Amino acid sequence: MLHYYLQLLSILLFICSPMTKGDSSGGDGGNVGMPGGRVPQDVNKEDIKELATKGLAKINHQSNSAHHFGLAKIEKAESQVVSGVLYTLTLRQVNSDNLAECNKYTGDLDNTEIYTVEYWLQPWRNFEQVTITKGQKEE
Protein backbone atom coordinates (compact mmCIF):
# COMPACT_ATOMS: atom_id res chain seq x y z
CA MET A 1 0.00 0.00 0.00
CA LEU A 2 2.87 2.38 0.84
CA HIS A 3 4.41 1.57 -2.55
CA TYR A 4 1.17 2.68 -4.27
CA TYR A 5 1.16 6.05 -2.44
CA LEU A 6 4.82 6.67 -3.27
CA GLN A 7 4.15 6.03 -6.96
CA LEU A 8 1.14 8.34 -6.89
CA LEU A 9 3.17 11.05 -5.15
CA SER A 10 6.01 10.81 -7.68
CA ILE A 11 3.55 11.07 -10.59
CA LEU A 12 1.91 14.14 -9.04
CA LEU A 13 5.28 15.80 -8.44
CA PHE A 14 6.28 15.16 -12.06
CA ILE A 15 3.03 16.56 -13.44
CA CYS A 16 3.04 19.63 -11.18
CA SER A 17 6.72 20.50 -11.60
CA PRO A 18 7.30 23.90 -13.28
CA MET A 19 8.87 24.09 -16.71
CA THR A 20 12.27 25.78 -16.69
CA LYS A 21 14.81 26.85 -19.24
CA GLY A 22 16.93 23.84 -19.99
CA ASP A 23 20.42 23.26 -21.23
CA SER A 24 19.56 21.11 -24.19
CA SER A 25 21.85 20.74 -27.14
CA GLY A 26 19.11 21.60 -29.62
CA GLY A 27 19.60 23.85 -32.61
CA ASP A 28 18.15 26.84 -30.77
CA GLY A 29 21.15 27.13 -28.46
CA GLY A 30 19.46 25.48 -25.48
CA ASN A 31 16.47 27.79 -25.21
CA VAL A 32 13.71 25.57 -23.94
CA GLY A 33 10.68 27.22 -22.42
CA MET A 34 6.99 26.86 -22.01
CA PRO A 35 5.24 25.34 -25.04
CA GLY A 36 3.73 28.18 -27.07
CA GLY A 37 5.97 30.73 -25.34
CA ARG A 38 8.36 33.13 -27.03
CA VAL A 39 11.84 31.85 -27.80
CA PRO A 40 14.72 34.26 -28.48
CA GLN A 41 16.32 33.87 -31.93
CA ASP A 42 19.82 34.71 -33.12
CA VAL A 43 19.62 38.04 -34.98
CA ASN A 44 22.56 36.96 -37.16
CA LYS A 45 20.77 33.95 -38.69
CA GLU A 46 20.09 34.24 -42.41
CA ASP A 47 16.35 33.55 -42.13
CA ILE A 48 15.98 36.33 -39.53
CA LYS A 49 17.95 38.75 -41.75
CA GLU A 50 15.71 37.79 -44.69
CA LEU A 51 12.56 38.54 -42.66
CA ALA A 52 14.05 41.90 -41.61
CA THR A 53 14.76 42.78 -45.26
CA LYS A 54 11.17 41.89 -46.23
CA GLY A 55 9.85 44.02 -43.38
CA LEU A 56 12.01 46.94 -44.44
CA ALA A 57 10.72 46.70 -48.01
CA LYS A 58 7.13 46.74 -46.73
CA ILE A 59 7.84 49.75 -44.49
CA ASN A 60 9.34 51.65 -47.45
CA HIS A 61 6.34 50.71 -49.61
CA GLN A 62 3.76 51.73 -46.98
CA SER A 63 5.49 54.94 -45.91
CA ASN A 64 4.60 56.77 -49.13
CA SER A 65 7.40 59.17 -48.24
CA ALA A 66 10.29 60.78 -50.08
CA HIS A 67 12.52 59.33 -47.37
CA HIS A 68 13.94 55.82 -47.56
CA PHE A 69 14.52 53.46 -44.67
CA GLY A 70 17.63 51.32 -44.42
CA LEU A 71 18.27 48.61 -41.85
CA ALA A 72 20.58 49.88 -39.13
CA LYS A 73 20.31 46.92 -36.76
CA ILE A 74 18.11 43.99 -35.80
CA GLU A 75 17.65 44.75 -32.10
CA LYS A 76 15.76 41.59 -31.12
CA ALA A 77 14.16 38.53 -32.70
CA GLU A 78 11.76 36.01 -31.15
CA SER A 79 9.63 33.16 -32.42
CA GLN A 80 6.46 31.61 -31.05
CA VAL A 81 4.57 28.54 -32.23
CA VAL A 82 0.93 29.58 -32.79
CA SER A 83 -0.79 27.61 -35.56
CA GLY A 84 2.39 28.14 -37.53
CA VAL A 85 5.24 30.36 -36.40
CA LEU A 86 4.97 33.99 -35.30
CA TYR A 87 8.27 35.86 -35.63
CA THR A 88 8.56 39.19 -33.82
CA LEU A 89 11.49 41.37 -34.89
CA THR A 90 12.49 44.70 -33.38
CA LEU A 91 14.32 46.68 -36.07
CA ARG A 92 16.29 49.91 -35.84
CA GLN A 93 16.07 51.74 -39.15
CA VAL A 94 17.97 54.68 -40.51
CA ASN A 95 16.03 57.39 -42.34
CA SER A 96 17.53 59.23 -45.31
CA ASP A 97 16.64 61.28 -48.36
CA ASN A 98 18.45 58.91 -50.67
CA LEU A 99 18.71 55.15 -50.72
CA ALA A 100 22.51 55.09 -51.13
CA GLU A 101 22.96 56.87 -47.78
CA CYS A 102 20.70 54.32 -46.06
CA ASN A 103 23.20 51.60 -46.86
CA LYS A 104 26.07 53.57 -45.27
CA TYR A 105 24.86 53.43 -41.65
CA THR A 106 27.60 54.82 -39.38
CA GLY A 107 26.21 53.77 -35.99
CA ASP A 108 24.70 57.17 -35.13
CA LEU A 109 21.39 56.50 -33.36
CA ASP A 110 20.09 60.08 -33.75
CA ASN A 111 18.64 59.46 -37.20
CA THR A 112 17.07 56.06 -36.50
CA GLU A 113 13.59 54.80 -35.67
CA ILE A 114 12.38 51.59 -34.01
CA TYR A 115 9.81 49.37 -35.73
CA THR A 116 8.30 46.07 -34.64
CA VAL A 117 7.62 43.65 -37.48
CA GLU A 118 5.51 40.53 -36.85
CA TYR A 119 5.43 37.68 -39.36
CA TRP A 120 2.85 34.96 -38.97
CA LEU A 121 3.81 32.08 -41.24
CA GLN A 122 1.75 28.99 -42.06
CA PRO A 123 3.76 27.26 -44.81
CA TRP A 124 1.28 24.39 -45.27
CA ARG A 125 -1.37 26.97 -46.29
CA ASN A 126 1.08 29.17 -48.21
CA PHE A 127 0.02 31.93 -45.76
CA GLU A 128 2.11 34.89 -44.63
CA GLN A 129 0.79 37.87 -42.66
CA VAL A 130 2.99 40.86 -41.88
CA THR A 131 2.11 43.46 -39.24
CA ILE A 132 4.27 46.55 -38.78
CA THR A 133 4.11 48.82 -35.75
CA LYS A 134 6.16 51.95 -35.24
CA GLY A 135 7.98 51.77 -31.92
CA GLN A 136 8.89 48.83 -29.73
CA LYS A 137 6.11 46.42 -28.86
CA GLU A 138 5.26 46.12 -25.18
CA GLU A 139 5.88 42.68 -23.74
Image (cartoon, rainbow, N blue to C red):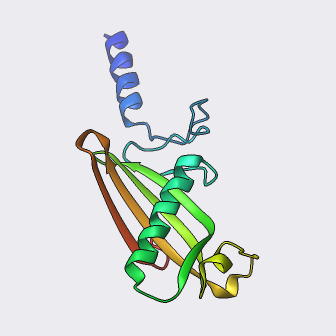
Residue at x-position 45% and y-position 73% = 137
Residue at x-position 57% and y-position 34% = 27
In the picture, measured across the screen, residue 112 lies left or right of residue 125, that is right
In the picture, measured across the screen, residue 64 lies left or right of residue 70, that is left
The quadrant in which the N terminus is found is top left
> Which residue of the protein is positioned furthest toward the right in this rendering?
106
Residue at x-position 56% and y-position 42% = 31
- Residue 71 appears anywhere in the view: yes
In the picture, measured across the screen, residue 103 lies left or right of residue 117, that is right
Q: Is residue 109 above or below residue 127?
A: below
**Near-viewer residue (93 or 98):** 98
- In the rendered image, residue 134, in percent from the top left (x then y), is placed at 45, 80
Answer with the quarter of the image where residue 43 lies.
Answer: bottom right
- In the rendered image, residue 120, in percent from the top left (x then y), is placed at 34, 55
**Near-viewer residue (27 or 110):** 110
- Residue 38 appears anywhere in the view: no
